[in-house]
Each structure stands twice: as structure tokens, then as C-alpha cells.
Amino acid sequence: MTRVLITDNYNSYNLGDAAILEGMRAALDAELPGLELRLTSAFPEIAERVHGLPALQWTPRLLGSRGAVAGWLVRSLAWALSWRLGQPLDRLLAPAELRLMRAYAEADLVLGVGGAYLRDGYGLSYLRLWQMRLATLMGKPVALYAQSVGPLAPRGRLARWLRPTFARLDLVTLRDAVSARILEAAGVRMRRCEVTADAALCLPPVPPDPSRDWQPAGDGPLVGVSVIHWHKFDQGSFEAYVEALAEALDQLHERRGVRLNFLSTTVAPSDAQMDVSGTRRDDLSVAREVAARLRRCPPESVRVSQEPIDLATLRGRIAAHDLWIGTRMHSCIFATLAGVPTLPIAYEPKVRGYFELLGLEDWVLDIETLEAAALRDGAERALDAAARLRAHMADRLPALRQRSRRNAVLVGELLRPGAAR
């Protein structure tokens, strides 16, 4: 039995994270049946509940002070070295830390989960890179699966960590060419790197949800909206983003009679006290804020979905829309997978990278410079060009799905007996 340790899942109540992991599983099961999968996660109990995979705490959730972080680095390094020498110093580690390090030791391959967690401004990027280096020190083959990288200052501290770490990895697959350009600009060299596509593209199709009980009233075009609580602005501001959205949606209702449906990929159960989104506020609170600023849309034409729903339900509802205005990247992926005309608002390079692969980069708006008129005009153009956009996506998506499956093919090559390291 080949054991694969999938690392660095964040929180599967974030349905973007859940979609990445489920897409990985689907591709790996198809290409490499019989793998024994284990997972490390910031919220392992949620990962086990959502995915049914055995999961471990990927690093102490609340390390607290810099001293606590430094202590973990020293202890984990000492344990890895002692394990490599055949005399692991188990007494150095707390029980949860020991379980984590033993999972690395027992793995035949360490596989970093797809997504975007290597960028300037994310302190946990360094801990993730540290654990990759520990795994290579222990002699394990290590690969990253459908990653995005950046924004990244080419001469910044994170770039200095990336260069020696990525040089030791056996395989890096990137889900967009933007990440490849960022790594090249930072002077990062790798043994093997290939641009593939997002892991969620391997999810099976989901039909549109035909029911009306989750939709706002009326007969106008159904426009879905995904928002984000973003706090890493350089030029713009969160206030300007929210105001531009509200003004554009008001104008769309006036001009086209649209119905507005706010759906979020990051809604946790009401009793779960956690940062599901990774941005300190869940998207539902932002959706309520945008909806509260609407002045020309009657209440019956606006719906803010409040309850947490599972991945398949969310995808089915997104598929029923006439237009999707999406900030969250995976909400846009779900929409395009269903052939729904999509107007993306890019908050990180990964969003533009996905739409470049799809050949629709001209439709991408930037969260930093978002203006109501540009958003309104883009939405109207997308509604008018709906048939053409659906045909374009139907033509391009098969190749993107194949690129997504390529991630698992490359992992299989790495696991083949005698594969070059």
C-alpha cells in the first residue's frame, strides 16, 4: 500500500478548499487507485467530517509567540535528524507534534495540497515551507500539486525562503502561468515544474438546481454575486470595493431588471467560532453589507443565502444563474464549469491566471481599481454575449480538465518504482 500524506489543507468549511481537495482525490483515485491518503489540516476535525479522510493538525494551531515558533522549528529539526539516523527523539515533541512528524516519516510521498498559500503577507507560508524542507531532509519525495504563488517580491524574504526549498522539491505543478512568471522573476529554480490547472476542474459535473425556494422573487435574469472581505489593498480600499459593487448592482436592476442572489463559499455553522475565509471576516457579513447599501433594488429581488451548504449544493445553485459576478476564485471556477457567463473580480494573481487559461482574461476586473461603471458595463456585455461565452467555455474546458488530470499523472510518474529523484 502506497501512503501519500497530503499537507496544508486550511479549512474545508471554505468550499474552495474543499473543492481543491475533492478534485485532487478524484484525479488521484482515477490515476492511482488504491492509494492510502492521509491529510494535515489547520482544522483536522472539519476535514475528517467533510472528506472522510484521517487528518492531523498540520502545525500547532496557536503557536502564539515567536519563541513558541522558534521552539517548534528547533524541536522538529532535531526530531527529523534523529529519525534519519534511526534513533528518533520522541521525547522532544508534544503528542500532537509527534503524530504529525510520524505521519511524515510513514509517508511514501508528501504532497502539498493545491491552492494559494505561498505569498507575501501570509506568515504561515514560512511554516509550510519549513515542513517541506523537513520532509526532504527525511529523504521523502515531496511534490506541490496545482499551486499558485504570489504576489511575491522577487528580492523579499519569502522569495529567499522559496529558492532553496523549491530547489529540493521533486515536482511542482502550477495551476496558472502567472505563478510561473512570478517564480521566474524571483529566480526560483526547480527540478521539475509544469503549468497544469486547478485541481477543482476534476470535480464531476453537477446539474443546475431547478428549485426556486433559494432564489429571489421575480422573472428577471438571475445574477449571482460572490464577495470577499479583502484587507490587502495597495491602491484601493475595502470601502471603495463594497460601494462600487452596490452601485453597479443597483444600476443593473434598474436597466435589466435583474434578480440578485448572494452566495458564499465561506459560511460555517453558527456555532463554529473560526476564521473560515482566512481573511478575518466571513463573506456572508460582506454580502449583508453590500445588500444593505442597495437603494434601487426592492427587497424581494435580493436574496442573501445565510445557511451553510455543502459543495454539491453550492455548485448546483451557481449553475442555475444567468450571470455570475464573482470575487472568490472558486465561485468563478464553479460558474465556468457550469457554462455560466462569469465576470471575475481579481483580488490575487491566481484569478487572472485561471481566466488566462480559459482565454477570457479580458473579462477580468481588478479589485484595486474597481469602479461601478466598469462593473455594470461588463455585466451587461456578458449578459448580451451569453451564448457566445457559453460556447467558448464549452470549447475550452475539456482541455483544462485534461490539464487538471495531468497533476495526478505526474504524481504517478513520481511514485513509479525507480523514478528519478
Image (cartoon, grey):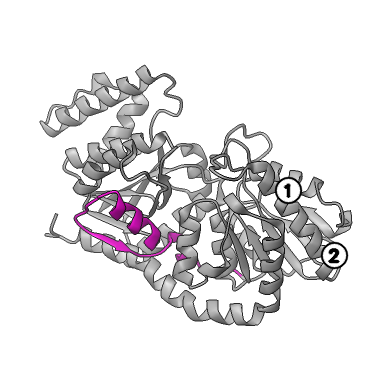
Q: Which residue is nearer to you in this view: 362 or 273?
A: 362
Q: Which residue is nearer to you in this view: 356 or 319?
A: 356
Q: Which residue is mark 2?
A: 254
Left or right of 385 on screen, residue 119: left
> Mark 2 or 1 closer to N-term?
1
Q: Are marks 2 and 1 in contact (CB under 8 Å)?
A: no
SS category of the residue bearing label 1: helix
Q: Is residue 129 above or below residue 205?
A: above
Q: Position of residue 318 (x, y in %)?
A: 65, 63
Which residue type does callout 1 highlight?
Glu
Quarter of the rendering containing residue 399? bottom left
Whether residue 215 is visible here, answered yes or no, is no
Counting other residues with Cα less than 10 Å from the Cα at mark 1, is it few (<14), some (14-19), or many (20 or more)?
A: some
* Residue drawn at 29 percent across, 35 percent down: 130
Q: Which residue is mark 1?
A: 243
Counting other residues with Cα less than 10 Å from the Cα at mark 2, is it few (<14), some (14-19), or many (20 or more)?
A: few
Left or right of 320 on screen, residue 97: left
SS category of the residue bearing label 2: helix
Q: Residue furthest front?
A: 235
* Residue drawn at 66 percent across, 34 percent down: 271
Q: Which residue is nearer to you in this view: 401 or 183?
A: 183
Q: Position of residue 9 (x, y in %)?
A: 43, 44
* Residue drawn at 48 percent across, 77 percent down: 396
Which residue type does callout 2 highlight?
Glu
In the image, the segment drawn in magenta is: 177-206
Q: Position of residue 142 (x, y in %)?
A: 25, 48
* Residue drawn at 39 percent across, 64 percent down: 27
